[in-house]
Image (cartoon, rainbow, N blue to C red):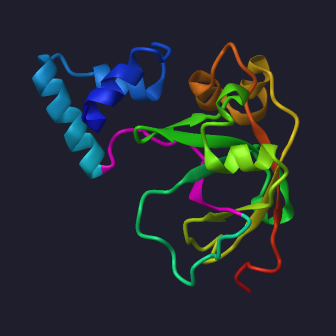
């Protein structure tokens, strides 16, 4: 199954007002035309795959060394801070995971599916390093730990409507507490 086909499948489960669903269903073409349009949107970056405000990056486990340069592959994770909060001061964030190139809040039911969240459940030290930017030069690292799970009805209030639309309605979302890792962060 191609990424475009998987996106069409995922979109069917999203709320009618979700930005991704609106973008995918905007065309009036046949299924082949829709697949071609989605694939073009993926290549150009036009599809709203990210949750607005998310910080994409890479997870590093307890025995992994953070490389001196940023990887050139797709991010392995993303975080969504509460409006007005900054990772650099330490923050409680929503843990986002990619499902076929589309980012969703991780639910507690999915924590054993991903290496970082399974490790955090075991009490391991995992670090998140954002894609390099002016706010986060490489390698700005943050140590994460599990925070209180967030009931579905609270996601919109704390993280915005878009995150809420993509969160599971039947499971609590995973929140993390992240603090700057002074030992490995860029100066």
Left or right, 51 with respect to 37, comes to: right
Query: Which quadrant holds the C terminus?
Result: bottom right
Q: Please state the horizontal and vertical placement of residue 176, each as a whole percent of the image.
A: 79, 46
Left or right, 47 with respect to 139, comes to: left
Q: Would residue 164 be counted in the magenta stretch? A: no
144 or 12, which is in the foreground?
144
Q: Which residue is drawn at 74% across and 35% down?
A: 174
Q: Which residue is drawn at 80% across and 56% down?
A: 124
72 versus 35 height, above or below: below
Q: Would residue 55 be counted in the magenta stretch? A: yes
Q: Please state the horizontal and vertical placement of residue 29, each as a whole percent of the image.
A: 13, 19
Q: Is residue 169 visible?
A: yes
- The prevailing secondary structure element of the residues shown in magenta is loop
Q: Residue at x 78, y 48 (%)?
A: 120
Q: Please state the horizontal and vertical placement of residue 104, each as a whole percent of the image.
A: 56, 34
89 or 11, which is in the foreground?
11
Magenta segment range? 45-61
Q: Is residue 51 visible?
A: no
Query: Which quadrant holds the N terminus?
Result: top left
Q: Which residue lies furthest to the right in this view?
A: 148
58 versus 42 height, above or below: below
């Amino acid at each position: 199954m191609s990424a475009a086909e998987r996106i069409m499948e995922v979109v069917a489960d999203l709320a009618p007002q979700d930005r991704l669903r609106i973008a995918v269903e905007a065309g009036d073409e046949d299924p082949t035309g829709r697949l071609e349009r989605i694939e073009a949107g993926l290549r150009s970056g036009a599809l709203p795959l990210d949750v607005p405000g998310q910080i994409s990056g890479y997870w590093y486990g307890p025995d992994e060394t953070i490389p001196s340069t940023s990887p050139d592959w797709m991010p392995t994770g993303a975080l969504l801070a509460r409006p007005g909060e900054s990772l650099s001061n330490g923050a409680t964030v929503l843990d986002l995971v990619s499902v076929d190139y589309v980012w969703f809040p991780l639910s507690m039911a999915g924590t054993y599916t991903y290496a970082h969240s399974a490790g955090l459940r075991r009490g391991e030290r995992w670090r998140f390093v954002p894609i390099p930017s002016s706010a986060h030069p490489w390698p700005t690292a943050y140590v994460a730990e599990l925070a209180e799970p967030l009931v579905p009805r609270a996601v919109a209030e704390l993280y915005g409507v878009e995150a809420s639309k993509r969160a599971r309605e039947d499971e609590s979302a995973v929140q993390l507490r992240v603090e700057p890792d002074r030992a490995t962060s860029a100066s």
